[in-house]
Image (cartoon, helix red, strand yellow):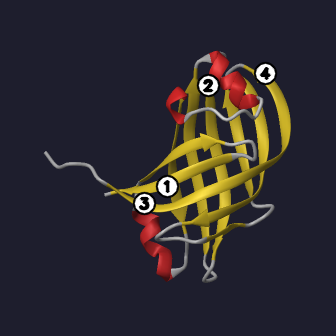
Amino acid sequence: MQQISFEHLFDIDLAIGNRHVIGRGPLGMRVIAEVTEGTVRGPRINGEVMPGTGGDWVLIGPDGTFYLDVRLTIRTDDGAFIYMTYHGIRQGEPEVLARLDRGETVDLSEYYFRTVPMFETGDERYAWLNGIVAVGLGDRTPRGPFYSVHQVL
């Protein structure tokens, strides 16, 4: 059987702005959070998240699990535009999630935070992104989420 391996693409550090609480519906608590800015740094992609192009349509389950649905646009340092979407899960023990919600620093071993990014671009220099599978390893900082994004080879 073939072994799975990964290649580090970039780290992305996001800032979250206004949160709009839609309320508790049949699937859980719905919150829409604005992604106001971000930086992208790594061996394959460098750039910034374009202001006004990002948001997270979060669903918070009854057990406190976050189900992420994020969309944003990256402008690379060399002028390309990359649309990035991802779904993900952030879960942990209730007391750990409460500490995260208060903006405390929590060791990554205390909770699970993973995403599955997908990319779309018309720029030929980055067209390889259109056909890959990637995973993001997340951390929640007081500013917002931080991900280390890796291509599954």
Name the front one of labels 1 and 4: 1
- Of residues 149 and 128, which is closer to you in this image? 149
Q: Earlier in the sequence, mark 3 or mark 1?
A: 3
In the image, what residue type sits under mark 3?
A: His
| Tag 2 secondary structure | loop
Q: In which quadrant of the rendered view does residue 73 lie? A: bottom right
Left of 3 or right of it: where is 146?
right
* Cβ atoms at labels 3 and 1 below 8 Å apart: yes
| Tag 1 secondary structure | strand
Q: Identify the residue shown where x is 53% and y is 71%.
A: 45
Q: x and y percent of residue 151 in the render?
A: 40, 58
Alpha carbon distance from label 4 to label 3 = 37 Å
Alpha carbon distance from label 1 to label 2 = 21 Å
Q: Which residue is mark 1?
A: 149
In the image, what residue type sits under mark 1?
A: Val
With respect to residue 47, does 53 lie above or below?
above
Q: Earlier in the sequence, mark 1 or mark 2?
A: 2
Alpha carbon distance from label 2 to label 3 = 27 Å
| Tag 4 secondary structure | strand
Disc ID at residue 8: 3
Q: Which residue is mark 4?
A: 24
Q: Which part of the image, by quadrant, shows the N terminus?
A: top left
Q: Identify the residue shown where x is 66% and y is 24%.
A: 97
Q: Earlier in the sequence, mark 2 or mark 3?
A: 3
Alpha carbon distance from label 3 to label 1 = 6 Å
With respect to residue 50, does 99 lie above or below?
above
Q: x and y percent of residue 134 in the render?
A: 44, 54
Q: Identify the residue shown where x is 56% and y is 43%.
A: 138
Q: x and y percent of residue 37 in the render?
A: 76, 59
Disc ID at residue 65: 2
- Whether residue 63 is visible here, answered yes or no, is no
